[in-house]
Every structure is written in structure tokens, then in C-alpha cells.
Image (cartoon, grey):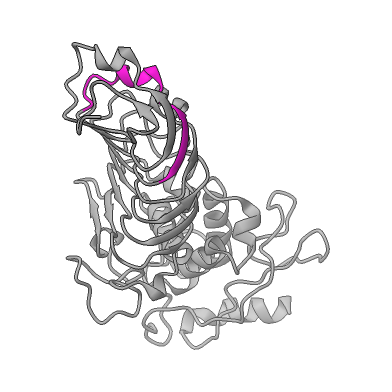
């Protein structure tokens, strides 16, 4: 097998070989000198079950020419295609768990295979956009992107001012995605789009993300513990999210929409970590406990909805008698929470 793979490597330059780009085994069980990712002592375990040999995507170069962008030894200048795969695997291991990358049935495994074998951009290790293109593909596979209402990979058009996801164009041109002047993702708006699945934890590594809107979908599971600290608006209302609200969300959050889910627990930690909130929408969940006095420490707060939950007790005096706050809407279940300053009034 290794000899055949070496022959395929040599024949790849003429564009006629069915190139065995990905050859992976459980390195702790099977010795392999030609696997990619590598089974050498520094490479760790290679990915698990391997896909079938896949022709390298993209147009076939003229006979006798190396693949586009290569010096004759591979897709990326100066490194072989095997080394390209290994280095991309190592780079993405800083974002995702290696076990998930190794399992080609996971969104992470599907994404790395797409990135190195199917994506027509054929990015090289160290590319500035490699991580975000990978993260967006993980989002696609995590939320059953093929079943999205709009902008799925095989869609003939996209009504969100962009191209279908996983297309050959820049991810900044995919529907619902906007990037800053430097080409880094800052906005993702995929509301009402039949996203079905869990929000991947990899989202926290989108370092410049300001706005994330997944409103009115079928997302389930828990809210990730962390998002990047540049996030200012998070819309996850009208989904099927469960568990508690993490206290480690972005400290710069200005607007947080979590209404109409199945969230539970208290909100003490949330309010301690998000002092910039202007709008807090938590209605129609199963949240419980007292309304914490730390609500009075949000000087910019204008709208806070706590109704249709299991809160109890009374609105703290520190909130009702705070001259530094001017809350326009403060809603509770008046039969459960005593409140002298709520609007609508109790």
C-alpha cells in the first residue's frame, strides 16, 4: 500500500492519478510509514476510519504540469501534500479535540476532510482564513446544513445576499456572513433557516465575531460555555436549547436574546459577567431563583424580560430605587415576583 501511495504521489503531477490524499489508521494499533496525518512519534494518532480514495478536487491541470500553486511537489509551495494534511491537522487541533477530528463521522471530521480534499480553495497551512473557514464548515455540518431552508451547499441560489455555504468563494461571501475590512468574520445571521443540531464550541475561536443571530431555528443542546470576547449581540431565542445559561459569555454583550427555549437554573452568574447589557430577553423558559441584586449594576439596561419563568421572591430594592438606571421595560410574573417598579406594572 505504501509503495502504491508513493507511486500515486509521483503520478499526481500529471493530473491523471486517483490521488490517495488521506490514508489514516489507529496509530497505536497499526504501524504506518506513509499515513497522512503521520504516525511518526510527533504526529500523535492519525484519524480513524478512512474515506475511500478521493480524486483531488478542482480542475485537472494540463498534462505534465504540477497542481496549481505548487512548485512541483504539492498543492502548497515548499511542502508535500502529505505534509500539508499533517500541518493542517495539527493547526486545527488547537481549535477542536483531536478525537473529534479523527472521527470522520463528526462535524469536525467531515469538515477537515472537506477542507483538505473537496474545497476548491485548497488552503495551505498558516493561511489567515484557514481557521474561520474550518469553523464555519463545522457549523454547517453541526446544524445539518444540507437541510437548511436557504444557502445550503447544493442550493441553486441564496436569498441572504451571498453564495451557498461551502462554495469555492471566500467564506465572507457565503449567505448570512459578513466580514470586516481585513477579511475576518464579524457577523453571522442565519435566523429562520432550519438549523437543526447543536451550536459547536468552535464558535469561540471566531476572534472578531460581533453579531451572532440563530433566532427561530431548531437548535438543541446547551449554550456553549464560551464565545469570543468581541461578541456584542447574541440572538438564540425561539430554539430548543436546554441546560443553564453560562456565566462566561462575552463581557461585552450589549443584547442577549434567549427567550422561548427550555433553559433552567439561576441567572446570578450571567449578570455578574455581563455588565454592558442594554437588552436582556429571558422570557418563556424554566429559569428559577430570585432576581439578583446585581441587576442594579447594569447602568445601560433598558429592557429586561423575566416573565413566563419560575422566578420568585421580589424585585430587589437596589433595582427599584436606583437613580442610575432608566429601565423602560421590566417584566416579571407578578403572581410569583413582587415588584413595585415593573413595567408593565404589577
The residue under the point 36% across, 61% down is 217
In the rendered picture of this protein, how many numbered marks are placed on residues?
0
Answer left or right for 169 relative to 294. left
Q: Nearer the viewer, residue 328 or 86?
A: 328
Image coordinates of residue 48 in percent, x first then y, are 69, 66
Please say if 86 is above or below 317: below
**Dividing the picture into quarters, in which one does residue 24 lie?**
bottom right
Please say if 345 is above or below 69: above
Answer left or right for 66 relative to 92. left
Q: Nearer the viewer, residue 93 or 68?
A: 93
Answer left or right for 47 relative to 284. right
Image coordinates of residue 151 in percent, x first then y, are 29, 71
Image coordinates of residue 123 in percent, x first then y, are 40, 61
Observer able to see residue 1: yes
Q: Residue furthest right?
A: 29
From which residue to which does the magenta span run? 285-301
Location of the N terminus (image quadrant):
bottom right
Q: Residue furthest front?
A: 335
Magenta residue check for 287: yes
**Dividing the picture into quarters, in which one does residue 240 lie?**
bottom left
Q: Nearer the viewer, residue 183 or 163?
A: 163
Location of the C terminus (image quadrant):
top left
Observer able to see residue 247: no
The residue under the point 55% across, 85% down is 18
Please say if 148 is above or below 4: above
Image coordinates of residue 85 in percent, x first then y, are 55, 62
Amino acid at each position: 500500500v505504501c509503495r502504491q501511495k508513493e507511486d500515486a504521489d509521483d503520478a499526481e503531477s500529471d493530473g491523471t492519478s486517483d490521488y490517495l490524499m488521506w490514508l489514516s489508521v489507529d496509530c497505536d494499533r497499526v504501524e504506518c510509514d506513509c499515513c497522512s496525518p503521520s504516525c511518526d512519534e510527533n504526529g500523535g494518532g492519525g484519524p480513524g476510519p478512512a474515506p475511500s480514495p478521493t480524486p483531488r478536487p478542482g480542475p485537472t491541470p494540463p498534462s505534465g504540469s504540477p497542481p496549481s500553486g505548487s512548485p512541483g511537489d504539492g498543492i502548497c509551495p515548499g511542502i508535500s501534500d502529505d505534509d500539508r494534511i499533517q500541518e493542517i491537522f495539527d493547526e486545527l487541533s488547537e481549535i477542536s479535540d483531536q478525537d473529534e477530528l479523527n472521527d470522520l463521522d463528526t462535524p469536525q471530521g467531515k469538515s477537515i476532510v472537506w477542507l483538505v480534499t473537496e474545497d476548491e480553495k485548497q488552503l495551505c497551512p498558516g493561511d489567515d482564513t484557514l481557521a474561520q473557514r474550518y469553523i464555519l464548515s463545522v457549523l454547517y455540518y453541526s446544524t445539518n446544513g444540507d437541510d437548511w431552508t436557504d444557502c445550503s451547499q447544493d442550493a441553486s441560489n441564496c436569498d441572504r445576499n451571498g453564495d451557498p455555504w461551502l462554495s469555492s468563494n471566500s467564506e465572507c461571501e457565503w449567505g448570512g456572513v459578513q466580514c470586516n475590512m481585513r477579511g475576518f468574520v464579524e457577523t453571522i445571521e442565519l435566523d429562520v433557516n432550519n438549523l437543526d443540531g447543536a451550536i459547536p464550541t468552535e464558535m469561540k475561536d471566531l476572534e472578531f465575531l460581533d453579531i451572532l443571530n440563530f433566532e427561530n431555528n431548531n437548535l438543541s443542546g446547551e449554550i456553549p460555555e464560551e464565545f469570543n470576547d468581541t461578541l456584542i449581540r447574541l440572538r438564540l431565542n425561539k430554539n430548543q436549547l436546554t441546560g443553564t445559561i453560562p456565566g462566561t459569555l462575552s463581557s461585552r454583550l450589549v443584547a442577549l436574546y434567549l427567550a422561548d427555549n427550555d433553559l433552567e437554573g439561576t441567572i446570578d452568574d450571567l449578570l455578574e459577567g455581563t455588565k454592558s447589557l442594554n437588552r436582556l430577553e429571558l422570557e418563556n423558559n424554566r429559569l428559577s431563583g430570585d432576581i439578583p441584586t446585581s441587576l442594579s449594576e447594569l447602568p445601560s439596561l433598558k429592557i429586561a424580560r423575566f416573565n413566563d419563568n419560575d422566578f420568585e421572591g421580589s424585585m430587589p430594592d437596589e433595582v427599584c430605587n436606583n437613580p442610575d438606571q432608566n429601565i423602560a421595560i421590566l417584566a416579571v410574573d407578578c403572581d410569583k415576583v413582587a415588584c413595585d417598579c415593573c413595567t408593565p406594572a404589577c
